[in-house]
């Protein structure tokens, strides 16, 4: 598998940038600890069980940025052009660039869940189901990173990151969306973040099963498959301009 | 197809991979049609960007083992041509094939046999020279042992062996360039494209690079773009002079120089060339013109004695006289009416 060769290089890039890696792992953790301490047990959505899933998803958005940046940089330095003259297919490129960031995203999620558990997080339902949702969302955000990296310059990527971070407001992780309602709820329902948050919270807090969260899963799955396919198509177009 | 989004996702992935496989199979060389002695064939190869014609229908063949230099000023269409041959750009017209593989219908087969050093120094900055080379070999599907051996050779030849363990971003510009070229060669390609391999190098590194590229000649086919005339002159078996996306001349360096007007030029190094002395010289040689440190005369019949007779009475000191050799610079000027600039 030639995509493994590409993944190896990208993994090295991740490991040799300990500052970025450290921030990617520490910042969500810090957020979890701070917000949890702020809310205590008085604010329901800041209790570990309801708070942690949002932080996990926030961490994935950070990985989206990292994956978009490396791709964008490789484009600007012509390293990608060099890779494009080797016999790799678009799907090899997408998987080769995604895998290391997907790996970090999943490690990050695991660390957050473990720390959350130490703080009192409980999983009433199936942990595997929570894992499936998180996995799909990690794939979604890293694929989104591929799309941004394939289309934007390094400078533009930072702007796009800010926009995606802003959009997480509609996800409901930072305040109770139901109380605000209106446009926030409508927009949130059209984006995958809120569905992933609702689904994981339901499984963890209420013990919901696959059938209960199926509508959310369709949204998430749709977005994920769409993002991966779009990333492959973008690479195909990059490969031959 | 299943309603389960996971199953659907996997299905689409494998569909994408299947399409890729067909690409490879279609890419088998058409041995019956492929002339073994030809490495590259371009027929009416053209590229336009909107209204701008970058390459205007190139017809060119490159025999196996030749080093062909595409020579021309910036914007002549050299890089665009290379990018089309490397399957990075879709031609607007015409066709091209590398070792019998059509660039449009069999890009994966083409990519299997080529090595490319892009104009920009494209190395992975956080990887050391070893890792950069092994990465490229891996992407070409070369097994680890062979890659290691080849990388070792290349590090030796490019003089990077002593710094092979340092990250590429710590290298000087010249070292990065050498690594970049080594990366194009590590997969043992049969056809190599070197796009401006010595751009931005100091004269010493440039000479070293020339020596290195000369050493590669013979076994593999090389297409090298440059806007340095000395480079084309020193390295190329044949030179294709391109300007405005068109082929304006093709031949060996000597053939190209031989096509010049052939009027000899004498360069006279002299000091104290007063206006009076210069006027006296012009009466005999109307083509005489001042150059830095002396005069230059272009004439069918030249006599150093006559030149001396014109200048000496006015106290001019003549240090040397020499017939100027026709350079590719002159060829280029004559062909395109332009001078090559950096």
Image (tube, rainbow, N blue to C red):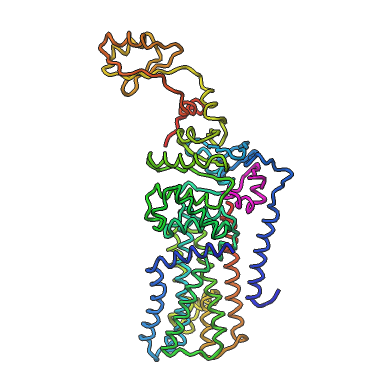
Q: Quadrant of the N terminus of chain B?
A: bottom right
Could one spot residue B69 in this view of the protein? yes
Determine if the magenta segment contains residue B102. yes
Q: Position of residue A20 (x, y in %)?
A: 39, 68
Residue in view at x 52 percent, y 40 percent: B224
Q: Nearer the viewer, residue A20 or B210?
A: B210
User: Is A26 included in the stretch rendered in magenta?
Assistant: no
Asked if A56 appears above or below B22 in the picture, the reply is below
Depth check: B244 or B213 in front?
A: B213
Residue B27 location in percent, x, y? 68, 52
User: Which of the 4 image quadrants contains residue A133?
Assistant: bottom right
Query: Which region of the structure is painted magenta?
Result: B86-114
From the viewer's perspective, tell me whether residue B60 is left or right of residue A175. right
Q: Position of residue B218 (x, y in %)?
A: 56, 39
Q: Give the total of numbered labels.
A: 0
Residue located at (53% from left, 91% from top)? A124
Image quarter where the C terminus of chain B lies is top left
Q: In the rendered view, tell whether residue B184 sits above or below residue B321.
A: below
Q: Is residue B93 left or right of residue B271?
A: right
Taking the image as drawn, is residue B57 in sight?
no
């Amino acid at each position: 598998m030639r995509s493994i060769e590409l993944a190896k290089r990208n993994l090295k890039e991740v490991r040799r940038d300990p500052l970025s890696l450290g921030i990617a792992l520490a910042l969500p953790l810090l957020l979890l600890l701070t917000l949890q301490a702020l809310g205590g047990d008085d604010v329901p959505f800041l209790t570990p069980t309801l708070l942690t899933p949002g932080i996990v998803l926030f961490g994935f958005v950070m990985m989206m940025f990292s994956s978009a940046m490396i791709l964008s940089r490789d484009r600007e330095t012509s390293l990608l052009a060099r890779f494009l003259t080797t016999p790799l297919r678009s799907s090899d490129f997408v998987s080769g660039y995604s895998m290391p960031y997907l790996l970090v995203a999943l490690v990050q999620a695991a660390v957050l869940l473990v720390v959350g558990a130490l703080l009192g997080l409980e999983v009433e339902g199936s942990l595997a189901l929570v894992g499936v949702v998180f996995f799909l969302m990690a794939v979604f955000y890293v694929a989104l990173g591929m799309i941004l990296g394939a289309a934007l310059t390094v400078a533009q990527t930072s702007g796009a990151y800010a926009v995606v971070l802003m959009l997480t407001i509609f996800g409901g992780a930072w305040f109770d969306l139901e109380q605000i309602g209106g446009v926030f709820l409508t927009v949130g329902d059209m984006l995958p973040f809120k569905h992933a948050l609702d689904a994981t919270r339901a499984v963890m807090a209420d013990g919901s099963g696959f059938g209960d969260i199926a509508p959310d899963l369709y949204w998430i799955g749709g977005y994920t498959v769409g993002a991966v396919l779009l990333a492959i198509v973008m690479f195909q177009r990059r490969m031959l301009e | 197809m299943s309603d389960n989004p996971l199953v659907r996702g996997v299905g689409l992935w494998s569909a994408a991979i299947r399409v890729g496989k067909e690409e490879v199979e279609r890419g088998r060389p058409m041995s019956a049609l492929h002339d073994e002695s030809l490495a590259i064939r371009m027929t009416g190869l053209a590229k336009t960007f909107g209204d701008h014609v970058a390459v205007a229908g190139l017809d060119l063949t490159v025999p196996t083992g030749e080093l062909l230099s595409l020579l021309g000023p910036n914007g002549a269409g050299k890089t665009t041509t290379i990018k089309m041959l490397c399957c990075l750009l879709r031609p607007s017209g015409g066709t091209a094939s590398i070792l019998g593989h059509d660039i449009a219908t069999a890009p994966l087969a083409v990519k299997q046999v080529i090595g490319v050093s892009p104009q920009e120094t494209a190395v992975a900055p956080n990887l050391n020279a070893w890792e950069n080379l092994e990465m490229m070999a891996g992407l070409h599907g070369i097994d680890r042992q062979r890659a290691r051996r080849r990388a070792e050779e290349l590090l030796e030849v490019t003089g990077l062996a002593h710094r092979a363990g340092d990250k590429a971003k710590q290298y000087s510009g010249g070292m990065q360039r050498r690594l970049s070229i080594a990366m194009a060669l590590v997969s043992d390609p049969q056809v190599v494209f070197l796009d401006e391999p010595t751009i931005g190098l100091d004269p010493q590194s440039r000479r070293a690079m020339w020596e290195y590229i000369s050493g590669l000649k013979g076994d593999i086919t090389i297409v090298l773009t440059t806007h340095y005339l000395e480079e084309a002159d020193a390295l190329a078996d044949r030179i294709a002079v391109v300007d405005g996306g068109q082929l304006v001349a093709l031949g060996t360096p000597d053939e190209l120089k031989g096509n010049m007007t052939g009027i000899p030029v004498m360069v006279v190094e002299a000091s104290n060339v007063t206006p009076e002395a210069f006027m006296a010289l012009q009466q005999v040689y109307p083509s005489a013109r001042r150059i830095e440190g002396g005069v230059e005369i272009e004439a069918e019949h030249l006599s150093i004695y006559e030149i001396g007779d014109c200048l000496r009475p006015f106290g001019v000191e003549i240090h040397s006289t020499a017939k100027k050799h026709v350079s590719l610079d002159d060829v280029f000027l004559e062909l395109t009416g332009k001078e090559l600039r950096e």
